[in-house]
Image (cartoon, rainbow, N blue to C red):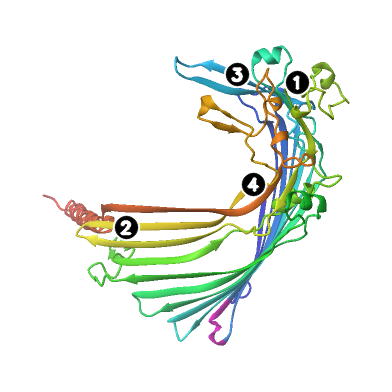
Amino acid sequence: TWLGRLDDVRDSLRALSLTTYATDTKEGALGFGPLVAPVSGGEQSERTMGLQLVHGQYFGVGNHVLTQNRLGVSRVRQTTAPYLDAPGATVLVRSASDAATSDVATLQLGGNPWLATDDTRWTLEGSNETIWNARGSKHRFKTQAWFRGDGLTQIGRPNSLGQYTFNSLADFEANRPSSYSRTLTQPDRRATSWNGAVAMAHQWNKSRYFSMLYGARVEANAFGDAPPVNAALDATLGVRSGVAPSRVHVSPRVGFSYTYSRAKDNGNGTSQNNLGVFYRSSMGYIRGGIGEFRDLYRPNTLADAIVGAGLAGSTLTLNCVGAAVPTPDWPALMASGASLPTACTDGGAALAERAPSVTLVDPSFDVPRSWRASLNWGSNFGRWVTKLDALASYDLSQPSTLDANFAGISRFQLASEGGRPMYVSTAAIDANTGAVSAGESRRSNDFGRVATRTSDLRGYGGQLTATVMPDVFRLRSRIQFFTSASYTIQSLKQQYRGFDG
């Protein structure tokens, strides 16, 4: 790890600093656990480097205006590699814990095809903040301009070697997998996102007891590119591909602080004696505020849509269940340059699915945002401090994912499970393992899962905290008094010991 900082302090009205940092980390035994075979782990290396330049300066009449500029850039590269270049296997095991229940766990064997990745991310960020006072200290203004760019490059194809699933140890011993999945093709993932904002706030200090702060923040979010358009997908499912929405939004915020206590018995918040000066927070106050807060666009949202467009060369996956699963030849699969399955066997068309997986960004997609309000009250009752803090949040534009290729047609119902609908026929369910193929639940067999990323979820929450505790400040003052008196008596004793008798 490296961390260095250089400061220029030659001018008292100007500050300039440069901070640099770098880390190089290597980790082995990645993914180890009590239910994971050692060869199913891997190793990871991560390199981080970055710098930040900060400039601050006072200017204007009387040097009452402060401006601060920040510019930073960082880069993180993370690579993972499995110990064994071979398909992975998960085995379900069950053990009876008592007469009524049983515990089900998953064993991880073979290689770990999900660890072969090379991930590089960078961030560029800059801001300016200017603060000045008007008419003394009654009015304080602050402006802010901010931007941030994020980018990623992911090289590697997760699950390129494939993953087998076994429903029991007996099935594993008999080499009878219930399903097999593999990513056949996936291009490198590259994407960028840009976020920016300008804001202005005004703080009005009517008196030393009451102040109000309010302002607004104008935010903009955009992606650096757009996914390709898939006309066949649009016509088949009635969706819109090639969408990378941008947003401009105004977020208002307001808050206040009122101190109604005018008590002077504690020296206006301080207590002074021969041991020093002690400060306390003002009690007898009411504070509150409400405002809207928004998240950022992330580049991985767009990267998934670019590589998963459903076109030639896009992400293509293979999913086989039951009799359509290729029987694994483990000695051959462990050998270098082994031939991996590229298709399901002839166990039945309903048990196989070889179609491109698609990711779409809905035109209404927006960043998560929430309205948050708080109200705080604190006061003294004798020697006790009482506080009441309330917090409420209303969350909007929360992310969700819908499958646009899901038909939603019930083929039959399970009477023993309260009429639970099944969206595939019995031909898509393997009789030996119970594995289900999702092919029959599709609206179109030309595509696999069409994950449409939307932001239509909402939520709300609240919190109320009450605190009652002794007034430590007043208690400390009494302790200080007795300590001081004891110290004086000890001094007098030392003085009188110098006399005979």
Q: Residues within 10 Å of mark 1 (few under 14, many from 20)?
A: many
**Is residue 8 visible from the viewing direction of this image?**
no
Q: Which amino acid type is shown beneath numbered disc 4? A: Leu
Q: Which amino acid type is shown beneath numbered disc 1? A: Ala
341 or 70, which is in the foreground?
341
Q: Which label is found at residue 384?
A: none
67 or 193, which is in the foreground?
193
37 or 269, which is in the foreground?
37
Give me the residue at 64% from left, 34% from top: 423
Q: Which label is found at residue 93?
A: 3
Q: Which label is found at residue 323?
A: 1
Between disc 1 and disc 3, the foreground one is: 1
Residue at the spot of label 2? 388
Q: Earlier in the sequence, mark 1 or mark 3?
A: 3
Residue at the spot of label 4? 402
Q: Which amino acid type is shown beneath numbered disc 3? A: Val
Q: Decide: is 235 above or below 40.
A: below
Q: Earlier in the sequence, mark 1 or mark 2?
A: 1
Between disc 3 and disc 2, the foreground one is: 3
Q: Residues within 10 Å of mark 2 (few under 14, many from 20)?
A: some
Residue 452 x, y percent position in the rendering: 68, 49
The residues tagged by marks 3 and 2 sit, at their Cα atoms, a distance apart of: 51 Å
Q: Which secondary structure lies at badge 2?
A: strand
Q: Residues within 10 Å of mark 3 (few under 14, many from 20)?
A: some
Which region shows up in magenta?
61-66
Position of 309 with respect to 377 (left or right) is right
The residues tagged by marks 4 and 2 sit, at their Cα atoms, a distance apart of: 42 Å
Residue 366 x, y percent position in the rendering: 63, 59
